[in-house]
Structures are given as structure tokens and as C-alpha cells.
Amino acid sequence: MTKIKTFIFNPFQENTFLLYDETKECVIVDAGCNEENEFKQIEDFISDNNLNLKAIINTHCHIDHIMGNAYFVDKYKVPSIAHKEDMPLIERSNDMAVAFGFKIQEPPVPNRFVIEDDIIEFGVSKLSVKHVPGHSPGSIALYCENDQFVIVGDVLFSGSIGRTDLPGGDYDTLISSIKQKLFSLDDEVIVYSGHGESTTVGREKKTNPFFN
């Protein structure tokens, strides 16, 4: 069974997820940490639970989701994974950091670019990649069929949707991505978003004001 530990980091209150299973292998999704005490929270959790970090995964590459990439790639010698369409965001990350008053380690170029229906494996866990552009060109969702959850980045929130007024965003594309790729999942699937509380596919189909 894949377990999820949630950390809330940086002034944007971004959700960083650490996924692990009974094999003790783990991955970090959206490493939004940038301060020493934030890095330590994850390091302590990995150490206390005797986990073996295998990869850093990004649902998308806006600055608040990639600030910790370089730190963990360097410290644990693990690959980073993202969608190629978000490379322009990585290339502009230092400029964006300065604009928001951050100083960051320059995020590395991903070692692996994923596309629709790719499978990311660690331990006995499998995450199916769904390309869900609209918030950013390379936004992906990570669907775990066995444990019925999906990590969606900033595409879908409890009662809301992701911004589309940032470079590369498109409202119609985002709505289409959610309807076709996320609302096609079972109603019971738990949705873990990049900010805020978790929800379910069924709840958002019924109550999200952008779809009613």
C-alpha cells in the first residue's frame, strides 16, 4: 500500500508529498521546500522511517513546486522527473525566484521526461501519468490505481481550479483536462492538490462551481 505524508512549505503554503510503501522506497512529489528547517523536516522523516529516496517528481514546474529539487537531487543522488512542456518554467526559475523575493539553488534539468500513460514505479507502487495541461503546458497528474488516489498539482482544488492567467495557462484547456482526465476516474478517488485540503473526484464533480 502506498502511503502519503504531506508537508506544507514556503509562503505559498504549497503541499509537498512524500510517497512510500512497505519496501521503504519513496519519492518526493513537488519539493517546494527552500529553507533549512523545511529540508530537515523531510530528511528527518526519511531517516526516522528508514526510507530510500528514489526520485523527485514534479506535477508542474512553477517556482513554488521546484525550489527543493536541486537540494534533494544533490544530496540523495536521485533523478528528477517532469513533463518536457514545462522546461521553459525551469529555465526561467531563477528570474521568477527573484521576482518573488526568493533565493534558490538552480533546479536541475529533469533526468526523465514523462508523457501520457507513462508509469513511474518505486517499490511495489505504480503511478500512471496523465497529461493535464491548462495551468501550465506540462502539468501532469499522478494516478495510483491500486490505492485510488491522484496527485494533481495545481490543476484542481477543493472547490476550485488552477490559475490560467500565468504564462502557458489556458482556461479552456484546463477545463478540458479536468473533465477528460480527472473526472473520468471513479468518484471515490482521493484528490491531493498542490495547495489546500484533499477532496474526491465525486465531490468536485458534484459541487465544484466551475462545473455546475
Image (tube, helix red, strand yellow):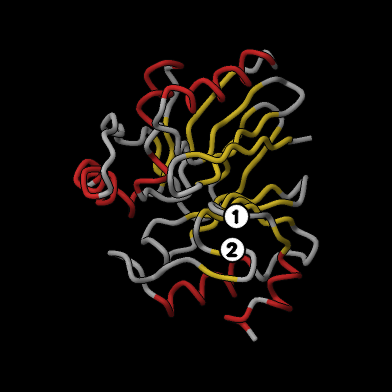
- Secondary structure of the residue carrying tag 2 is strand
| Label 1: how many Cα within 10 Å (few below 14, some 14–19, many 20+) | few
- Secondary structure of the residue carrying tag 1 is loop
Q: Which residue is mark 1?
A: 196
Q: Residue furthest bottom?
A: 212
| Label 2: how many Cα within 10 Å (few below 14, some 14–19, many 20+) | many
Residue 165 in the image: above or below residue 83 = below
Residue ID at (59%, 75%)? 179
Residue ID at (36%, 61%)? 137
The numbered dot on residue 157 is 2
Q: Identify which residue, 80 or 164, lies in the foreground.
A: 164
- Location of residue 78 in the rendering, given as x and y in whole percent from the top left corner: 45, 22
Q: Determine which quarter of the picture holds residue 122.
A: top right
- Location of residue 197 in the rendering, given as x and y in whole percent from the top left corner: 66, 55
Residue type at mark 2 is Phe
- Location of residue 192 in the rendering, given as x and y in whole percent from the top left corner: 64, 52
Residue ID at (29%, 35%)? 109
Q: Identify which residue, 147 or 119, lies in the foreground.
A: 147
Q: Determine which quarter of the picture holds residue 201.
A: bottom right
Residue 152 in the image: above or below residue 120 = below
Q: Determine which quarter of the picture holds residue 3.
A: top right
Asked whether disc 2 touches disc 1, contact meaning CB atoms under 8 Å apart, the reply is: yes
Quarter of the image where the C terminus is located: bottom right
Residue ID at (42%, 51%)? 60
Residue type at mark 1 is Gly
Q: Earlier in the sequence, mark 2 or mark 1?
A: 2
What whole-number distance in Å separates the C-alpha atoms at marks 2 and 1?
A: 7 Å
